[in-house]
Amino acid sequence: MIEIKQIQDNNESYFAAFDGDKVAGRIFYTSAAEKKMILDHTEVDINYRGQGIGNKIITRIVEYVRENDIKIIPLCPFAKSVFEKTESIRDVLV
C-alpha cells in the first residue's frame, strides 16, 4: 500500500509516496512568500511509473494546502499538466 508523507529537512522539502521503506515518487516544493508553495519537480521511480503515483502525491498536496490555506504555483511540467486537466483542484492555484 502506498503512503504519502510530507518530508522537510535542511536541504529539501517534498511530498513522497512510500511503498513500505521504498520511495516510489516525490514532488519537491519550495515556499514562495507566506501561504504560497511552488511545485518544482516530480520524480517517480522507474518501477512505479504508470501507476498514478504522481497523481496520488498531487491529491495529498491539494488536501494539505486546502487544510492550511496555502496556494500553489505549479512550475513542474507534470504538476502543471495535472492542474490543467483537473478543474476540481484549480481552487488551490495562485
Image (spheres, grey):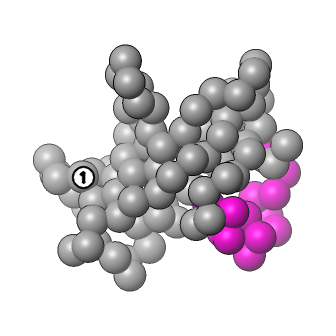
Number of residue marks: 1
Q: Along the line of sight, which residue is nearer the eye, 38 or 50? A: 38
Question: Does residue 22 appear to the left or right of 30 in the view shown?
Answer: left
Question: Taking the image as drawn, is residue 30 in sight?
Answer: yes
- Name which quarter of the figure residue 12 lies in: top left
In the image, residue 8 lies in the stretch drawn in magenta: no
Quick check: 39 above or below 48? above
Q: Position of residue 66 (x, y in %)?
A: 72, 39
Q: Most extreme residue toward the left, as rendered?
A: 21
Q: Is residue 86 visible?
A: no
Query: Where residue 17 sits: x, y (%)?
Result: 34, 53
> Which SS type dominates the magenta stretch?
helix
Expressed as whole percent of the image width and height from the top left, the position of residue 82 reads 66, 68
In the picture of the structure, the residue carrying the numbered disc 1 is: 23
Residue 94 position, x and y percent, is 85, 43
Identify the residue at horizontal 24%, vertical 52% (top origin).
23
Q: Which residues are magenta?
A: 79-92
For disc 1, the neighbor class at 10 Å (few under 14, some 14 to 19, many from 20) is some
As drawn, which residue projects farthest toward the bottom?
A: 50
Name the residue nearer the viewer: 43 or 15. Answer: 43
Residue type (three-letter) at the residue carrying disc 1:
Val
Q: State the residue at coordinates (37%, 18%).
A: 10
